[in-house]
Amino acid sequence: MADVIAVAAIVVVVGAALWYIIKSKKNGVKCIGCPHAGKCSKCISED
């Protein structure tokens, strides 16, 4: 039973991370983890 709970927790965490990445990419965010919200020099030069 503990194995099922552990697997379910991992699936939820990975699913939430994928959902966040897909949502961010659809909104046009280039650097998903960037604290500058895509306004850093690296993100601007990639246009």
Image (spheres, rainbow, N blue to C red):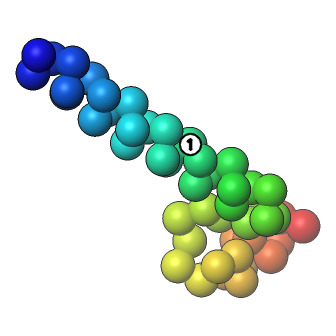
The image quarter in which residue 3 lies: top left
Q: Amino acid at mark 1?
A: Leu
What residue lies at 80% left-to-right and 56% top-to-bottom?
Answer: 26
As drawn, 44 above or below 25 = below
What residue lies at 90% left-to-right and 67% top-to-bottom?
Answer: 47
What residue lies at 49% left-to-right and 47% top-to-bottom?
Answer: 17
The image quarter in which residue 2 lies: top left
Residue 6 percent coordinates (x, y): 19, 27
The residue at the far left in this view is: 2
As drawn, 45 above or below 10 = below
Left or right, 7 with reference to 38: left
Left or right, 18 with reference to 41: left
What residue lies at 70% left-to-right and 76% top-to-bottom?
Answer: 38
Residue 44 percent coordinates (x, y): 80, 76
**Around disc 1, counting alpha carbons within 10 Å, would you say few (fewer than 14), some (14 to 19), or many (20 or more)?**
few
Q: Which residue is mark 1?
A: 18
Q: How many marks?
A: 1
As drawn, 27 above or below 26 = below
The residue at the far right in this view is: 47
Please state which of residues 35 and 22 is positioned toward the viewer in this rendering.
Answer: 22
Per the image, label 1 sits on a secondary structure element best described as helix
Left or right, 4 with reference to 36: left
The image quarter in which residue 11 lies: top left
Residue 18 percent coordinates (x, y): 56, 42
Q: Quadrant of the N terminus?
A: top left
